[in-house]
Image (cartoon, rainbow, N blue to C red):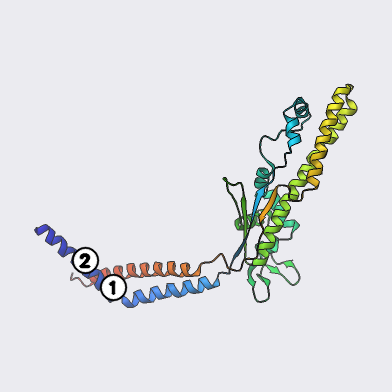
Amino acid sequence: MSSEKNFSLDEEVDLRKMLDAFLKNMILIVLVTSSFAMISIFYALSIPNQYQSSVVVAPINNDGSSLSSLGSSSIGGLASLAGINLSSEGVSESQIALRIMQSWSFIEVFIQKNNLSKYLIAAEGWDDQNDRMLFNPDVYDSKNEKWLINKPSSWSLYKSFIGRLSVQEDQKTGMTTITFKYYSPRVSKEIVELFIEDINQYMRSRKLEKVDKSIRYLQRQIDNSPIKEMANVFYQIIAEETKAKMLAEATPEYAFVTISRAMIPYERSEPTRSIIVIIWTIIGFTISLLAGLIKYHLDGFSLKPD
């Protein structure tokens, strides 16, 4: 019983000391907490708004049933010897496209093609009243369209772009949501639309180049083959490859078809200013409380007689 009573008395004394320390350092605690709150408010207001625009796409099966049937026949075996894959098995065009669209090489070309360097490195905000981008005057001269620093490297441009890009694939449905975040809602929408258009165009050109190469190879084999039956086989493969070429040429949305098109966002995605202010105010209060307790103990230690 006595030990429990001593424990409760010690606990009460500790609480009284903490309360006493809080009251004696009330001004310090209020000043530090208020300072953190004010600084966090100014900081939160200084962060420019960011808007994100998203597009939902679905993969397209471009393998073709006729090519698949040939791939399972003896013709498919001959085609494989010629370096031509007529089978629909393996990695699909859309799966390849998902990896290519996030690669450094593709994004580098995309940035150069659409002149996005200044938007990724020099931009620091958006004037919503006049719908124009705000550029850092120490980095880029927007009037004369000149860099005031060394031109950004390919790697820095890639890191800036990929940091704003989000590619999320739903394994159940196979659909992919591609999102781009930027200061301007209009620019965000335009970039994500151009991105989908360019990856489709890239994959289509890639397929056409591959088919043309295969047809040229087969035509050389026909010219050099003394066996008539072999030439007939090669003609059949050329016919199927020609069908694949015509399909690619007639399909602008070659790798992905748009399910939900991009829209101009009207609400910002970040920053969440209220959370920033709350977190930093709590941090300020905690630091001031610890400082008050330390000061209270130091004052008490200095008042002890020698």
| Residue at far left of view | 2
Name the residue nearer the viewer: 202 or 293: 202
- Provide residue 188's location: percent of width, then percent of height: 65, 63
Instruction: Give the distance between the C-alpha atoms of the residues marked 2 and 1, in whole angstroms.
Output: 12 Å
Residue at 53% over, 73% down? 45
Circle 2 Cα neighbour tier, 10 Å, few/some/many (<14 / 14–19 / ≥20): few
Helix, strand or loop for disc 2: helix
- Provide residue 174's location: percent of width, then percent of height: 61, 46
In the drawing, what numbered circle is on residue 14? 2
Quadrant in which residue 15 is drawn: bottom left
Name the residue nearer the viewer: 300 or 302: 300
In the drawing, what numbered circle is on residue 291? none
- Give the left or right position of residue 176, taking residue 229 as reference: left
**Callout count:** 2
The residue identified by callout 1 is: 22
What's the residue type where badge 1 is placed?
Answer: Phe
Labels 2 and 1 touching (C-beta < 8 A): no
Q: Looking at the figure, which quarter contains the N terminus? A: bottom left
- Give the left or right position of residue 254, taking residue 156 as reference: right
Whether residue 150 is visible: no
Quadrant in which residue 179 is drawn: bottom right
Q: Looking at the figure, which quarter contains the C terminus? A: bottom left
Helix, strand or loop for disc 1: helix
Name the residue nearer the viewer: 216 or 285: 216
| 28 shown above or below 57 | below
Quadrant in which residue 2 is drawn: bottom left
- Provide residue 146's location: percent of width, then percent of height: 74, 67
- Give the left or right position of residue 6, taking residue 88 as reference: left
Circle 1 Cα neighbour tier, 10 Å, few/some/many (<14 / 14–19 / ≥20): some
What's the residue type where badge 2 is placed?
Answer: Asp
| 81 shown above or below 185 | above
